[in-house]
Image (tube, rainbow, N blue to C red):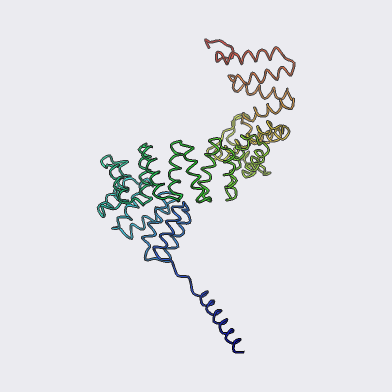
Amino acid sequence: MASVNIAQKIGFLLISTAAFAACVPALAMTKQEYGAEIDKLFLNTQFIDAQRLCEKAMKELPQEKVFFLTKHGEMYIVATKGKAGLDSAREAMKLAPKNAQVVATLSINEYIAGYVVKAEQLAQKAMELDAKNARAHAAMALSGLRDAAIPINEELAKALKLAPKDPIVYIVSGTVHLRKLEYDQAEAVYSQMVRAFPNTALPYYQRGYFRREVFNNNGALKDLAEVVKRYNKDRYVLMTRAKLNKKTGHYKDAIADFDALEKLAVTSYARRAECYAALNQYEQAIKDYKKALDEDGVYRSDFHQKYAKTMGSTRRSAWTQMMNGKDASELSDTKSCWLKMIILQQKHGDVDEALKEVTKFMTVFPGDLNSVYARHEILRKKGKWVAALADISLLISKSPNVADYYIDRADIYKHLNKPDRAAEDLKRAHNLNTTGTVSGDLTK
C-alpha cells in the first residue's frame, strides 16, 4: 500500500507541475533574440514575416520601439510594397532624432520614396551625428546621384569598409552603381554581397533582379533559382522567374513555376497557356485559356450585355469601336486571350468550337478586325468559301496594302472556280511585294 501511495503522490506531483507549466506564459524573446530572428527572415527574403515580427516585438518590448521601427524601415528599402516601412522609419526618427543609424536609415528610405532633397538633408545630419556610421556614408552616396559635389565612390568605399556585414550598405551601393549605369561595378558589389552572406537568399535576390534589369537573363534565372531554393513561397519571385523562363523559351520550367504559383492561390492561366501552345500541347493550352476567360467573366450570361452597355455610347460604327481608358485596360488582356484561344482551336482542328467562340467574340467586340480575319480562316477550313470571301474582302477594303490578304482571297477564288480573279489578286500581291503599290506603279 505504501508503494501505491508513493506512486500516486509522484503522479500527482508530475501532473501538478505540468499543469503549472502550462499556465505560465513562455518567456518573451529579448531584443537580441528578436533582432536575430528578424535578420534571419530578412536575409531569407521573408519580408512580410519579418515585418510582422517587428510589429510583434514592438508590442512586447515597447522600450525598444526605435530599434524595431528602424528594422521595419529596412524592409521598405528592399521590398517597397506600400509605405508602411517609410512611416516606421519616420516615426523612429521622431523618437530618436540624434541616433545616426536611425537618421541614415530614414535618409535612404526618403530617397527611395522620391524625397531626394529631404534625403540629402538627413544624410548630412547623420554624418554630423556620427562620421563613422556606415549607413550615413551610404546615404551620402545615394544623395550624390543628384549632388555632383558629393564624392560617391569615396562614400561607398567608406560605407563598405565600416560595415562589411550590413546588407543595407550593399543594397545602396548596388543601387547607386545601377543608376549611374555602372553595371560592372554593380555586379561586383552584389557578388561581394553573395560572398558576405553565404547560404542566404537576399544577396541572390538583389543580384538576380539587377541582372534582369540589365538583360542578363541567364544570370538572373540562376540567382532566382537560389532564392527559390531557400524560400519557395515568395509569389513575386516565382512570378518573375516564370515570366523570365517564358521569355527565354524555357517553357517547361515556366509551366512548373506557374503550377507552383497556382498552389499559392496565384493564377496566370493565359501565360501558362502560351507556354503549352509553344510546346504544341494544344489541349492543355486551350484548357488554360478557358480558365483565364472564365476568370474574366466571359462565360457569364450577362457578359455581352454588360460590355455592350458599357461601350455602346462610344461606338462610331458597326466596324469601328472605341474604348475609354478603363475599358481598354480591362478588356485588352481578355480580347488577346480570347483571340489566341480561337486561333489555337482552329489550328488544333476544333473548327466548330472555334467558330462558336469567334461568333460570340464578335457580338461583344464587333469592331475588332483581328476576329474578322480569324473567322475568315475558320470559314475556309469549313469550306464556306462565299462567307470567307465576304470577310477577306472586308479586310481588303479596310487595309488595301496587305499582300497576304490578296493571296488568301486568290485561294478562295480558286475554290469558287474564278481563276481570272485569283490571278488578278496574285498579281496585286506581287505588286505590293515588289513595288509597294497594288497597281505596281512606282510613281504612286
Give how far across and how far down residue 130 sits, in percent.
26, 54
Q: Please tell me whether residue 301 is drawn above or below residue 20 in the rendered image.
A: above
Q: Please tell me whether residue 59 is drawn above or below residue 224 in the rendered image.
A: below
| For residue 161, side relative to residue 26 (left or right) | left
Is residue 305 shown to the viewer in this render?
A: no
Count of numbered tags: 0
Looking at this view, is 297 or 27 the one in front? 27
Q: Please tell me whether residue 237 is drawn above or below residue 345 in the rendered image.
A: below
Report the quarter where the N terminus lies. bottom right
Looking at this view, is 353 or 136 the one in front? 136
| For residue 175, side relative to residue 130 (left or right) | right
Looking at this view, is 149 or 377 the one in front? 149
Is residue 393 shown to the viewer in this render?
A: yes
Q: Quadrant of residue 346?
A: top right
Give how far across and how far down residue 369 sits, in percent.
62, 28
Give how far across and how far down residue 335 sits, in percent.
60, 36
Q: Quadrant of residue 340?
A: top right
Residue positioned 64% across, 39% down in the render: 289
Residue positioned 66% across, 36% down in the render: 281
- Which residue ends up furthest to the bottom in the rendered image? 1
Give how far across and how far down residue 42 sits, in percent.
44, 54
Residue positioned 37% across, 64% down in the render: 64
